[in-house]
Amino acid sequence: MSSRQLRHIALLSGGKDSTALALFMRDEYPDLDLEYVFCDTHKELPETYDYLAKIEAYLGRPIVRLSSGLGDRGFDHHLTLYRGFLPSAQVRWCTRALKIEPFEDYVGDEPARLYVGIRADEHREGYISTKPNIKAVFPFKEHGITKQDVFRILDDSGVGLPDYYEWRTRSGCYFCFFQRKSEWVGLYEEHPDLFELAQTYEKPDEGYTWQNGESLQQMIHPERIKEIKARDAKRKADAAARRRPKTLMEAFTGENDDFEEVDGCLICHL
Ligand code: SF4
């Protein structure tokens, strides 16, 4: 590759939108020499690795895995540097250390176009590199691709949704602090070993917990689990009641956009 050749890169998070974009780009622009990249924090869910294998099979191309979570780039190393101070929505050091910096190092100084899966029906901003040689582009916005289209793309390809969507709505690290409490309970029930590992990071006596004011140990008290599940069921029912059918077909079939959006970090959760 010439040092000045423009590179085209799709950054996958293991979530639905970045996956649909990778599939969309392959099908719409078959001649584009697209690099598929995943920043592996080594704290991902097993379902994410399975999903990446499925995506690779469909693309017929390897996904470059940046081992951003190993050695002196890894979460545990950075946690030591931060003296055990767990990342949070306010102090999100993990995103920069485990996702943004490894990606920017991978691209280097060559001019690159980064394809970002923000949809036409969204008004949020994605990762936009501060490096002048990396230019973010938004094909879903240009092509008017909405959430329903994303589901269609995933469905038509046979790739579908990652299995973790059955109990959690976001990709990223198993201990991600952006999780809802119901998702923590999901982790406890689906992956008790990972839940236990997440617990080892907490020091409730020193105020270091993943969730403000509540340790994971407190969260898995049977009464508390019941309460969290009941609240989540009510939240979902309220959200469903607020939504109105969008098309005549949906009105008749009852199918609708019953997928909630995730908030959080787009480079991790898109
Ligand atoms: S998924 Fe969550 S914990 Fe992991 S790097 Fe992203 S923001 Fe941090």
Image (tube, rainbow, N blue to C red):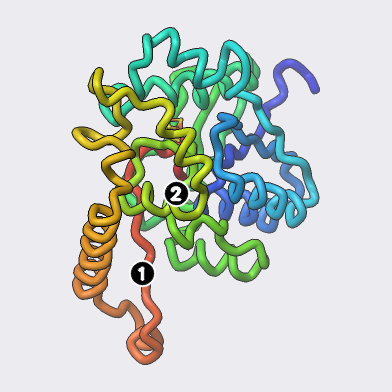
* Image quadrant in which you'd find residue 236: bottom left
Q: Nearer the viewer, residue 214 or 146?
A: 214
Q: Residue furthest front?
A: 222
Name the residue rendered at 80%, 23% in the picture: 1
Name the residue rendered at 32%, 45% in the picture: 263
Q: Amino acid at mark 2?
A: Leu
Q: Secondary structure at mark 2?
A: helix
* Distance (Cα) linking label 2 and label 1: 22 Å
Name the residue rendered at 58%, 51% in the picture: 19
Name the residue rendered at 24%, 56% in the picture: 223
Q: Nearer the viewer, residue 102 or 148?
A: 102
Q: Amino acid at mark 1?
A: Asp
Residue beneath disc 1: 258
Disc 2 + disc 1, Cβ < 8 Å: no
Could you tell me residue 167's position as x and y percent?
44, 58
Where ligand 1 lies, by quadrant? top left
From the viewer's perspective, is residue 209 above or below residue 156?
above
